[in-house]
Image (cartoon, coloured by chain):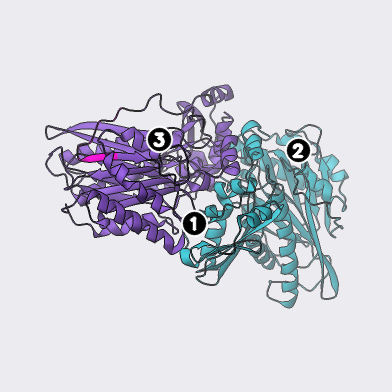
Chain colours: A purple, B cyan
Amino acid sequence: MQVSPLAPAASPSIPPVEGVLFSTGAAGVRYAGRTDVMLVDIAPGSTVAGVFTRSATRSAAVLDCQAKLAKLTEKPRHGFAIVVNSGNANTFTGERGARDVAAISAAAGQAVGIPPEHVFTSSTGVIGEPLPSERITGILPELVAGLSADRFEAAARAIMTTDTFPKGAVEQVEIAGRTVTIAGIAKGSGMIAPDMATMLGYIFTDANVTRDGLQSMLSAATKTSFNAVTVDSDTSTSDTVLLVATGRAQTPPISSGRSAEGRVFAAALGRVMQDLALQIVRDGEGATKLVEVRVTGAKSVRDAEKVARAIADSPLVKTAIAGEDPNWGRIVMAVGKSGAEADRDRLTIRFGDILVAEKGWRAETYREEDGAGYMKGEELVVAVDLGLGRGSATVWTCDLTARYIEINADYRS
Amino acid sequence: MQVSPLAPAASPSIPPVEGVLFSTGAAGVRYAGRTDVMLVDIAPGSTVAGVFTRSATRSAAVLDCQAKLAKLTEKPRHGFAIVVNSGNANTFTGERGARDVAAISAAAGQAVGIPPEHVFTSSTGVIGEPLPSERITGILPELVAGLSADRFEAAARAIMTTDTFPKGAVEQVEIAGRTVTIAGIAKGSGMIAPDMATMLGYIFTDANVTRDGLQSMLSAATKTSFNAVTVDSDTSTSDTVLLVATGRAQTPPISSGRSAEGRVFAAALGRVMQDLALQIVRDGEGATKLVEVRVTGAKSVRDAEKVARAIADSPLVKTAIAGEDPNWGRIVMAVGKSGAEADRDRLTIRFGDILVAEKGWRAETYREEDGAGYMKGEELVVAVDLGLGRGSATVWTCDLTARYIEINADYRS
């Protein structure tokens, strides 16, 4: 498959995170000739946090992760493992789905010497098909033998479905005189892909962070990263982000994003997650443009989010962008349908720095050729100010092209 | 432009409605070589009701219609007029937009001999451009001279934008020994079209209906017709449906849909409106399939509507249907993301009569080739039972094809 035109020029070089080992293998879950299982081995003394899809039909693996996270105590004696397969989502597979998750957890726990309650699993791919979990458990000895700290890119490749490039990001910051690494991988491609795909993200740090602190900082950063991107408004049954802190950098414990150390950590975590989230949009199916929708001046943050999402999810806005048409009327339409409070005469619309519309009409200075020229860019900013208050929100999306239809109408991954 | 493959085989033959005269003309608002203005002249003694877009950025004409309807008294002395133009939506045109509506109302009122407050206008087409209202008022003498009872199809053509066929529907019923006619026209094509288009509908009857009765029956029927269809989830700033009752059939007055006569009238009105609404979906841009999404067994009607809309608006569901892929996993995804209460193990999914999934998994009897065969049809039913209660809802939509992208990315009408 051709790599997205919006892909980063190069994959980042990601250093090891102390206490975290990776391994990948080819289990033949569905795909041939590629790796499709990732095993992560996490040292004792680590903390784990997670955020998940809110879907009412979420997958067996998501339900299992949520139950296990809820039961964890602070700094348990054992380490953790994460097992992820691509090729099969193990979703809508009845009670058998839960049995397959249990089988993988039991076998992986045994293989790395931890209780099965410390094994988190994710599955992404086709749904409604039984997961051949024995293929995954069958290669566990091989995976354990191959564990290595230096496998970020291989791990990012093993979890891909229709992604056209592996997604990784890293930040290093000084905390209390120690260098802390935050490194993550993710796969998309968006909330969407043939058979729904899934958004998965796994982020690792050697910082020393309490369980509650880790969860609160992960949840906060999700709002402005993975929950602020949309490819086609569809939501997977398997979306999962796990954040692991091994503490090996021996910083003082961080228990929230409000302390001096916490602020530094939370900001770096936010950058890693936003970087990964934007890579997912850059790999949106058929995408040729990355679009940042910035809404300001709303009555509330909630209203700003509604407007930003209405614009970012509008098929008419997204097709206009695909066609490089500066069709600002569709922005007006999306603002109007969003459900947020809006006043035609206070609305201001800009494409990048170009003032397009204000005071209830096209701006006097606006020239269609300026808008058309701007739309030829690969990275676009659509800025809307509602002129009503101080609520603001930013959402990232991509354009909607005929290629998206081809991918989703013609293939099942 | 090629006529939609889902177009009805023939346009219905619509008889005159006593008290209603039509005329059409070519004002050159934007299009050349076609009619683009419709004038309707309605006899004194008539009642009028309307439903409109809920957009916060609705057009000058919509705001004007709403203000005029609110001020109407029961059976005023004068008749009414409706003036509709295609080619320009007069939306987001600042204060000038309201002045153009006033100019058309004044000129049309004078031309047919009624006060301007009795003139309703609609505009559909490009937005953000000033409406050349003088072109419309300039052909009013010609329009008045051409008024005739027998112009339904010509009227339906004059209001088209990207529609590929004119849309009309008629029902005749006996009420108190009198034959009552309910006839309507509409344009789509969906909530969508280049520059948003608009859904417009005008329905006329010679029944004798009070103003409040007309409004309540129109509002009720809108729920299961124009508000139960979706092409791409986008909402126009100009959506308008007007219902006019001239009383010339001399039935006893109908003041609600609950009397014996009211029930007959409301049912026939519902059929006309649903027929028009489905014609709009059949003319959805790029549509090759008409899809009925039937949801039953929800906790509430509101939950059923949420699920039906989540399925009908899902780009992944709609692209799968375009590809004739019986991808029921995407139905599960849409149920899950809808926000309605759902239980994986109680969910039942059918394509037409084919049982696809139940009890949390693919049905034992389901064979992929049966689903694939079903998907080759032009008119499809996706039925979902949630197994939780008695709430039900039906929504109609069409598939999402590469042609939709082409139309919306490459042209501005």
Q: Are marks 2 and 3 on the same chain?
A: no
In-front residue for pair B243/B406: B406
Q: Horizontal and vertical percent for residue A127? A: 49, 52
Question: Could you say whether the residue bearing mark 3 is in a helix, strand or loop?
Answer: helix
- Residue at image position (61%, 49%) is B325
| Numbered mark located on residue B136 in the image | 2
Q: Which residue is mark 3?
A: A278
Q: Which residues are magenta?
A: A13-22
**Residue B26 location in percent, x, y?**
81, 37
In the foreground, B407 or A121? A121
Does the magenta portion include A295? no
**Which label number is shown at residue A319?**
none
Observer-side mark, 2 or 1, equals 1
Which residue is denoted by mark 1 in the rendering? B338
SS for callout 1: loop
Pointer 3: residues within 10 angstroms few (<14), some, or many (20+)?
many
Figure check: B214 above or below B8: below
